[in-house]
Image: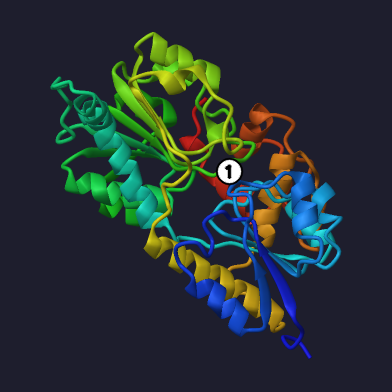
Amino acid sequence: MPGKSKWVVVSTAVTFGRSATQPVRRLEDAGCEVRLNPYGRPLSKDEMVEFAHDADAIILGNDQLPASVIKRLKKLKVIARYGVGFDGVDLAEARDQGIVVTYAPATNREETADFTFGLILDLERHISRMVMDTRAGGWKKYTGTSLYGKTIGIIGVGQIGTAVARRALGFGMDILGYDIVQRNEAAVYGVVYTTLNDLLRRSDIVTIHLPLDESTRNLIGSRELRLIKPGSILINTARAGIVRHGALDKALRDGRLAGFAIDVFSKEPPDHQPYYDYDNVLVTPHVAGNTYESSQRMGNVVVDNILSVKEGVEPPDPVTPQHLYESMLAMGRGLETPNHPVVTPPRSKRDLIDKIEGKNIHPNSSPDILQLASARKHIQK
């Protein structure tokens, strides 16, 4: 009978079950054997195979789960992302293996927005620099920059971006937003939508809240950083691949950027970058969404998804065919489903933008691509 067998649930998510233990107890009460990450970091491919070789369910953190690993996990039935993004999962391979993929939307939205403003305040008021200086016996009073009356530019006005806008409104800031889709909720909090170029030119603070896919990879490069308002600061709590390292380093050295804060990395722990040592750079270990409250909230959503699959019912938060389509585009592969015949994925960012601008669109393209096409006026490259 579904739901009666003993399941093995392994968590590669470093923080799952550490501060909030209720989700672990729920799994154990449902007859699951639970194993927590023994490394305190994301797992390598070989470690993943060894750790999860007999797993029915993986609670996936910031690890990569490519096709080569998925194929070797013969018992796997569900991949439950402990978080929002799933760019590290080969969704097509999971589909082919009959594995359900779920995620935990909006579970750390408020916490990430809080942390974003913590980084903004730290950079603009030099809080960390003065703490370290005072501890060392100094007494230097750095002059900060006010937030009131400044312009914040939010790149990616989804759930987290909108939560950032709510906070910016409370600080008395003007708010610009850039996104493919304009959401009415964000406008309630004062977001004025504009193009990416205009946002960069006018914003005193730029904060990124986008998923990583082929259209956003290296979105902020040398060209964009030359456009950015001199003396502005840049915050990235989204994905590391959205900003080019080399271009960023140059913008900081040249003084074009007055500060930068990053909480996301292509691997964890990251390879050291020269700009990590700059006084006007903050580097934090991917903790923007991590609080006691969000850990319990996210953990319970993950458990809800796993137990649903275990009981043979539809999980509350499945990764949908639309997500799969977007993932296939990002991986440079074609996709065929009953409703969507094979559509050739973009060969480059320019190719994707051509698709978004209404060129080369297959009439049976996914609803997301058709929606992008209708919003093409917001793309400016």
Which residue occupies 63% across, 84% down? 30
Q: Residue at x 52, y 28 (%)?
A: 243
Give the answer, above or below, for where 333 lies relative to 6. Answer: above
Rendered position, 287 above or below 194: below
Farthest bottom residue in view: 1
- The residue carrying pointer 1 sits among few (fewer than 14), some (14 to 19) or many (20 or more) residues within 10 Å by Cα, namely many
Residue 255 horizontal/vertical position (percent): 34, 11
Is residue 223 something one can see in this rendering?
no
Q: Name the spot of residue 306 as percent of width and height, x first.
A: 64, 73
Name the side, left or right, on which 66 lies relative to 300.
right
Residue for badge 1: 373
Viewer-proximal residue, 40 or 169?
40
**Which residue is outermost to the front?**
137
Q: Position of residue 372 (x, y in %)?
A: 56, 45
Residue 252 falls in image quadrant: top left
- The three-letter amino acid code for the residue at tag 1 is Ala
Numbered disc 1: secondary structure: helix
**110 or 329, which is in the foreground?**
110
**Rendering coords of residue 70 (x, y %):** 80, 55
Q: Which image quarter is the N terminus in?
A: bottom right
Please determine whether, in this image, residue 329 is positioned above or below residue 280: below
